[in-house]
Amino acid sequence: MGLNLNSVYQRPYFVQDRRNQVKKKEDQERSTSNAQREEQTNQNSRSKGLQYVDRNTAAYQPQQLTTEQLSVPYPNEVATALAQRNPNINIAQILKDFKNTAIAIGTPEDLKEEVSGYLALIEKQVTKETPNSKLIKSNLKNAASILDNYISKTLDKDSKVVENWVDALFLQQIDFKYNENDINPEFLVKFPEDTQNRSQQAEEVQQEQINPFIPQDSELKKLFIKAKKMTYANKPKEAIEAFQTALNRANELDDKETQSKIFLEVGKIYDDHDYLAQALKSYNQSVQRTQDCNVKTRAHYSMAEIYNDVNQIEPAIDHYFSTISFAGEAENLTVQSTSLAKIGNIYSDMYEKTAFDYFEVADTIADETDNAKVKGYVSSSLGDAYDKFGDSPEALKAYSKAVKNYIDSDSPQKVAQNYLNAAEIMLEYKNEEKAKNLLEKAQKYARKTNDINLMTEISNTLVSIS
């Protein structure tokens, strides 16, 4: 049986009239009272391993593939997994990771020289008795900007991934006095033991902080990096073929952890290009081969997102719960909070008040992190839920909190959307003056984005009350 992404037990779609929608649940329940849940068995049998195959046209029909390119995961993976328990890190560790980042993304020689110039200025500073931290940070930002510009041109997509990573490091307690022996193990990605001696292994592990998915075997590492480069070049067929070769080598070594990481990478390629059946199979293969809670967290979350996107409630919730469990073992509060909010959104869309139980826990966990974007997401989702249930005062409070957090995370599109949501509530209560004020704020932030639809919606709403 092929993957059936059209299960009868789906989250319903609703128009955004935003008011008195709870009553619709009764009609929804009556219309679906006789629906039977379909059993999802052997759902990925049409996937052909790592082969790049056509999607099953008889199953779920995804949106047409756009020019959206693949993301560069190196620094962001580190930025979202920075240790909560011990935030101390030496500048030597940062510099080494920065250089490895430049190598990993294939930076051209001319740009490497430019980056090296900034790093040389930093290295000169950190050997001083009292390093100038402002100068060091400034040069790091300049070097990061060069790498991001290169990534943006390569992927034809605006990138701030390296700068975001640097900003995340600036939130830590940095020792600017250079000491290459001062290594914070909380910032290192753990790899399985092999026959290499421990000093060499420590060198490899530290190098792979910027990419937790590069194996230690030299031949396998070359094959893996080749496949990753194909991914960055937006050549999915060639990338998957290269990963197949890498998988063959990993099988020879009986390296299950690297096998798992390969399947995770392949799953992401399929996922990004809407080959959902193949993506689900690859993610599942990744989970089966690893003992790494971080990898399990990513794989389960990715599977949950696929099922959530196609409105299959039960498998989505199951995988979100698995994500929460493994994220807990990995001490990843960000993913825990996000997954709880996702579950809350599912129940909210079904008009189940259980949603607020999940939002409450998500909000509590989010407050324990320094991730303003996640805090904003939880608050915004909670605002939507309160609005659906007709609790306007609480909705406005949640939207206000979301705005503050999204401003802190420099997310203008999200800021504008939450101002717009609050303005719509004000309009429903005939408070046009307050609504206009909120819409003008929304317009201010929307102009900082490329979201034409959002800007048009805000403008049209302003015109309607002028």
Image (cartoon, grey):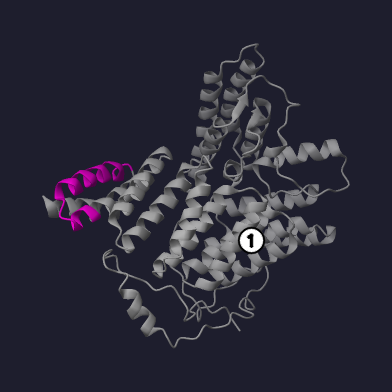
Extent of the magenta region? 425-448
Residue 207 shown left or right of residue 346 in the figure: right
Residue 38 shown left or right of residue 183 in the figure: left
The reply to whether residue 194 is in sight is yes
Which residue in the structure is indicated by mark 1?
Answer: 266
Image coords of residue 402 (percent x, y):
38, 46
Q: Amino acid at mark 1?
A: Val
Image coords of residue 312 (percent x, y):
50, 73
The reply to whether residue 238 is in sight is no
Q: Residues within 10 Å of mark 1 (few under 14, many from 20)?
A: many
Viewer-closest of 320 and 359: 359
**Is 112 one of the magenta-colored residues?**
no
- Give the overall secondary structure of the magenta segment: helix
Q: How many marks?
A: 1
Image coords of residue 55 (percent x, y):
54, 74
Classify residue 319 by image quadrant. Answer: bottom right
Residue at 28%, 43% in the rendered image: 447
The quarter of the picture where the N terminus appears is bottom right
Residue at 33%, 63% in the rendered image: 388
Viewer-closest of 209 and 67: 209
Most extreme residue toward the top is 129
Residue at 61%, 78% in the rendered image: 43
Q: Is residue 21 above or below residue 272?
A: below
Q: Is residue 209 above or below residue 33?
A: above
At mark 1, the secondary structure is helix
Most extreme residue toward the left is 466
Viewer-closest of 112 and 415: 415
Image coords of residue 173 (percent x, y):
60, 28
